Image: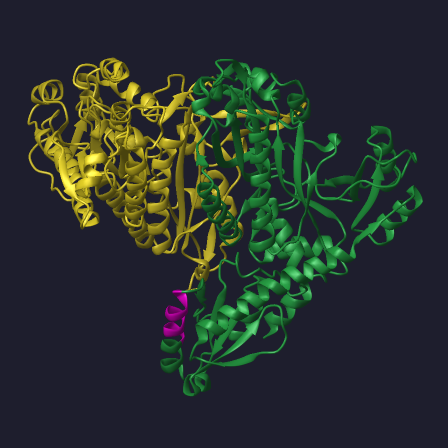
Chain colours: A yellow, B green
């Protein structure tokens, strides 16, 4: 059992070196790895299985709400990217440019898509003629490239996976309702499936998507007190419609520009998952997203002829209700496997040895708990189902308590500076909506305005200038 | 009903102008469209739904056979692409090169992946140490870019979607068995789901994947007498293992190179589907892949209050067993809808009007047949299920008869030239395995060697030089 001790010792403590702990968990749980390509990572099968879970859940919800999937070109001519002025300003510094095809130099550079408004909207101009063609509710699953020099696995990479929704609507109200519908679906995914509590709101103008009139956002708090943007839904107004001339003949026989939206969540969510739930033993996965909810480890030895068939029967039985992994590799000890599945965050482990077979029982360990439970095989499905639900709820509640304890309020700039430094987390302030006041806060705190909540009224004064506050803003240092 | 006649007239006849017919069906069934990006197409939602069907079917089969999904970087440094000499020779002329990131010129060019051996094998070198780590059975779903000037929707585009499998094995036999396993899965997909008969075999050396020791292939015959490669599975030997130094410690304590494979099918399959089954009214989709197997068109008019609820109830009822579309749009006539769903290839259409409601019946039309059938609502699921099975079988049998009628044999070069020109399709010949004889055939016929069958013995003489034939080869002109 030497391996066990080495493995545990080598992982830094989450509370002592959060950043290194994070990287080690991502690598050693085999979620991702560095590659020879600067800024790009490989997503390993176990990490990708989490992404497949997110995809499957979202795909179902998107289809239920009338969305369809399509695919648009990876390479976008520079002239198209330039059509929407703010958009190109925002993205040009991050674009990877294709300049040669085979031996030939291209007459126009092609952007490896950083996002696809500039290629999708021109197609909408072809496809949309009448109000009868609206709404268009479409998305694609793909990867995008935004040039980065540093690599933080999942959190900051030159290439990442996402879906990007792009919808076209007849009216402003329809487009805004779509943004809010998607915001709700994202919230459900992040809170109910990934067990990460989020605040929802809109971004101040400085933090909006380049070219958007309004950006809805979901913000989570990580255990180091830093916020992370977990998803966004952009109300693009008619900006892209005008830039790409996307018009339709309305019921009143008038030609009008469409209203458009775009929205996304990315593989960054997997980084949030690691940070939010992991501990000093490694990854902790919420049951609803875990690739394996139940890992069965047979205790092998002299009685393999009894234990192995019992373990297989148990796996077969539980597979009809749960995602089950039977780890019957004979080259590894049971102790080694326990450590490995703790590192990989499987929510429930079942051990079955000779005595368990004889006694018609199994031994269950929760990834989130210390003591083992001996359970009868009778009605085991229901017991395991209940325990998985408890783990799911426990992870969410733990995150929510932490988050709620780290939301403070500041009436003055000094209080804000102190809260950002000492309490960390989110600090609520009043804001007059002047850019200069926001700039002052950024300079003094290193924090950024994360969101303006949808459901809180402004009150009091701007934390910087003392003028009446128009809105309330949550500040935090952020990923 | 003016629309109807125009719509039918505007589609060229398949038998008269196959190429233009093909393009018009792809566009007007809304499978794909041209984009402002040279050589790149957009896959529209209806076309993408077919791809989703292919993905879902393959994903299930791949998982059942122990494969896992992952993701590797889009951009591959030039030095990595150059490591395997034949590989870079084969792909370099087709590569799109990224030379700038943001404002900065890169010190090394990055290839937009044309295929991913050169980035996956270096990761295998990191991940594989021991025979216990083998096999690695991994794939990714993505797009690749291979520079093309011309665009033929689905058939020839600079960017296309595919999956690429990349597996690593302990022995040559294991790697070859993997190639054959995948070949079998592809055959099942293409014949049983897409209803397109294929010949299976291996490519002659000149047609192998760049860097492979052996390429297994599936070849289909299109109704214009041209062959199309429908999928490939490559035995890469130890070529890539040596180029990227992928070694493992075997059970006998010796360090050895892994044996690797790679394999793929692409969105080109959708092009084959259009060509194989379509007719002068448009697309014809085999039921097992059709996004909508059953389209219900209510006959609206004075009795909408009776007809619409009945149509909805029917849709709900059939949805538990089939993929059903209720087309209750009120802006279009029933006749317009009939034409549209014929263009879009829905296998079965159900009409329901006031008299049908009264008589507890529906009127069924097969996309492949002329006469309508009036069916009782009692047991309708079973009737529809049986009819869908019949359509599936009919499409496959029709293709198989055509294909079998277009396989001829040639004993001399003159016979071969004549057969390629007059009969079209596949022509079987004996071959001595000399490259010069193959070159002669290519020059004289414009045909290429499509495959060497797995299950046919060579006999007789080489069709060119008259030396004893070592293998039998199927020649055809090809896409």
Q: Say which of B18 and B182 sits in front.
A: B182
Give the quarter of the image for residue A190: top left
Is B135 left or right of A326, judged from the image as shown? right
Is A326 left or right of A84, judged from the image as shown? left
Total of numbered circles in the picture? 0
Would you say the magenta stretch is mainly helix, strand or loop? helix
Locate the C terminus of chain B by quadrant. top right
A261 vs B172: above or below: below
Residue A350, horizontal then vertical, whole percent = 22, 36
- Decide whether residue B436 is among the magenta residues: no
Q: Which residue lies at the image location 32% right of the left edge and 31% below the top edge? A: A268
Residue A400, horizontal then vertical, whole percent = 13, 36
Give the quarter of the image for residue A26: top left
Residue A127, horizontal then vertical, whole percent = 52, 53
Locate the N terminus of chain B by quadrant. bottom right
Residue A208, horizontal then vertical, whole percent = 31, 34
Asked if one can make out residue B278 in the rendered structure from this viewpoint, the answer is no
A148 vs A144: above or below: above
Q: Say which of A56 and A340 sits in front.
A: A340
Q: Say which of B9 and A275 sits in front.
A: A275
Q: Which residue lies at the image location 26% right of the left edge and 31% below the top edge? A: A299
Give the quarter of the image for residue A200: top left
Q: Which residue lies at the image location 52% right of the left edge and 47% below the top edge? A: A123
Give the extent of the magenta segment: B311-320
Asked if one can make out residue A158 in the rendered structure from this viewpoint, the answer is yes
């Amino acid at each position: 059992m030497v391996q066990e001790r080495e493995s545990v010792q080598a992982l830094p403590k989450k509370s002592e070196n959060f950043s290194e702990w994070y990287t080690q968990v991502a690598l050693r749980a085999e979620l991702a790895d560095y590659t020879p390509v600067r800024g790009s990572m490989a997503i390993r099968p176990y990490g990708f299985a989490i992404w497949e879970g997110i995809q499957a859940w979202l795909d179902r919800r998107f289809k239920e709400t009338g969305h369809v999937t399509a695919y648009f070109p990876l390479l976008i001519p520079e002239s198209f990217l330039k059509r929407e002025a703010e958009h190109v300003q925002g993205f040009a510094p991050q674009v990877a440019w294709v300049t040669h095809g085979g031996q030939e130099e291209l007459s126009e550079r092609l952007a490896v898509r950083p996002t696809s408004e500039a290629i999708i909207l021109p197609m909408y101009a072809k496809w949309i003629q009448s109000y009868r063609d609206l709404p268009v509710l479409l998305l694609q699953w793909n990867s995008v490239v935004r040039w980065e020099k540093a690599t933080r696995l999942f959190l900051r990479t030159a290439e990442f996976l996402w879906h990007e929704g792009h919808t076209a609507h007849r009216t402003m109200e329809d487009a805004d309702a779509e943004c809010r519908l998607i915001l709700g679906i994202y919230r459900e995914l992040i809170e109910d499936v990934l067990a990460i509590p989020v605040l929802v709101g809109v971004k101040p103008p400085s933090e909006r998507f380049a070219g958007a009139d309004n950006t809805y956002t979901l913000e989570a708090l990580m255990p180091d007190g830093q916020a992370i943007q977990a998803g966004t839904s952009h109300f693009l107004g008619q900006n892209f419609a005008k830039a790409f001339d996307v018009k339709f003949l309305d019921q009143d026989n008038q030609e009008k520009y469409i209203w458009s939206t775009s929205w996304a969540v990315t593989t960054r969510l997997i980084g949030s998952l690691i940070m939010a739930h992991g501990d000093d033993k490694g990854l902790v996965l919420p049951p609803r997203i875990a690739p394996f909810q139940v890992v069965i480890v047979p205790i092998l030895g002299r009685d393999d002829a009894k234990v192995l068939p019992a373990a297989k029967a148990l796996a077969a039985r539980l597979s009809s209700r749960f995602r089950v992994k039977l780890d019957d590799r004979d080259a590894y000890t049971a102790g080694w496997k326990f450590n490995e599945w703790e590192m990989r965050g499987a929510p429930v482990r079942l051990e079955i040895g000779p005595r368990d077979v004889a006694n018609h029982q199994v031994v269950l360990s929760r990834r989130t708990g210390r003591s083992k439970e001996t359970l009868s095989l009778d009605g085991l499905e229901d017991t395991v189902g209940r325990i998985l639900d408890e783990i799911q709820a426990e992870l969410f509640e733990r995150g929510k308590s932490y988050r709620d304890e780290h939301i403070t309020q500041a009436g003055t700039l000094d209080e804000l500076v102190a809260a950002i430094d000492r309490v960390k987390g989110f600090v609520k302030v009043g804001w007059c909506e002047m850019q200069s006041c926001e700039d002052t806060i950024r300079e003094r705190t290193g924090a950024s305005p994360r969101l303006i909540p949808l459901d809180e009224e402004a009150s009091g004064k701007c934390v910087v200038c003392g003028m009446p506050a128009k809105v309330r803003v949550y500040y935090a240092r952020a990923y």
